[in-house]
Amino acid sequence: MSIPTARLASRLASRRLLPATRRYSTAEPEPKKSGSNTTLYLVAAAALAGGAYYYYSSNPDQAAALKAEEEQVVKHAKAMKDSAIAAGHDNIAAARKEAESARDRVIAEADARAHQVATQARGALDSARSSTENLYNDARKTGDKASGKAQRTWAEWLGWGSAKKEEGKEKLDEAAAGGKAKLDQAAAKLDSKK
């Protein structure tokens, strides 16, 4: 192949228009085409299976040991399962106990808070009742003072009225006596003129 032809072939191969050509050098041996190894693999597998069958069938102690080992594995698996179930029950019991203690703690805190609020409310009610009673007592004292003052004032008015009445009666008696004396004088004068 000449050089221009080789260049053209390499360009076409790079553009995927022609399949790439491979040239083997004389130093590199050509790859050997081997036959199918499937038969070899089948023969080896059959020999291995036959050997295993012969070993386990000709040695009953090995089969019993294998069965005992299988029983041990099953027993161990059952023990692990039972242990896991017991651990699960323990975890459930611990979680239940923790939830109950948390619930009891919340209930105790709520009771303490309710008791505190009730105590504060009772104290406020007692304070309001005491304040109301004090106001009532003060008002009653003020009313009693006002009533006593009114009674004293009324008594004073009654006393003043009685005094004025007596004074008026005395003046009336004096005026009547003076009038009678004047009438007596006038009558005496009339009698003397006769």
Image (cartoon, rainbow, N blue to C red):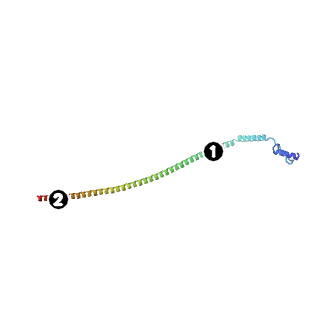
How many marks on residues? 2
Image location of residue 140, percent across then percent down: 35, 55
Image location of residue 142, percent across then percent down: 35, 56
Say which amino acid is labelled 1: Ala
Say which amino acid is labelled 2: Lys
- On the rendered image, what quadrant is the C terminus found in? bottom left
**Residue at (83% x, 46% y) in the render:** 11
Q: Pick out the residue farthest to the left.
A: 194
Observer-nearest of 77 and 172: 172
Residue indicated by mark 1: 77
Image location of residue 181, percent across then percent down: 16, 59
Instruction: Count neighbours of disc 2 (C-alpha within 10 A) and say few if under 14, some if 14 to 19, many if 20 or more.
Output: few
Observer-nearest of 43 and 89: 89
Q: Residue 189 appears in which quarter of the rendering?
A: bottom left
**Residue at (38% x, 55% y) in the render:** 135
Sooner in the amino-acid sequence: mark 1 or mark 2: 1
Q: Is residue 23 visible?
A: no
Q: Residue 22 appears in which quarter of the rendering?
A: top right
Against 135, residue 13 (above or below) is above
Q: Is residue 106 visible?
A: yes
Instruction: Count neighbours of disc 1 (C-alpha within 10 A) and say few if under 14, some if 14 to 19, many if 20 or more.
Output: few
Label 1, label 2: how far apart the Cα atoms are? 154 Å
Residue indicated by mark 2: 182
Residue 64 is labelled as none
Numbered disc 2: secondary structure: helix
Q: Is residue 176 left or right of residue 36?
A: left
Q: Is residue 3 left or right of residue 176?
A: right
Q: Is residue 26 left or right of residue 122?
A: right
Q: Pick out the residue farthest to the front.
A: 193
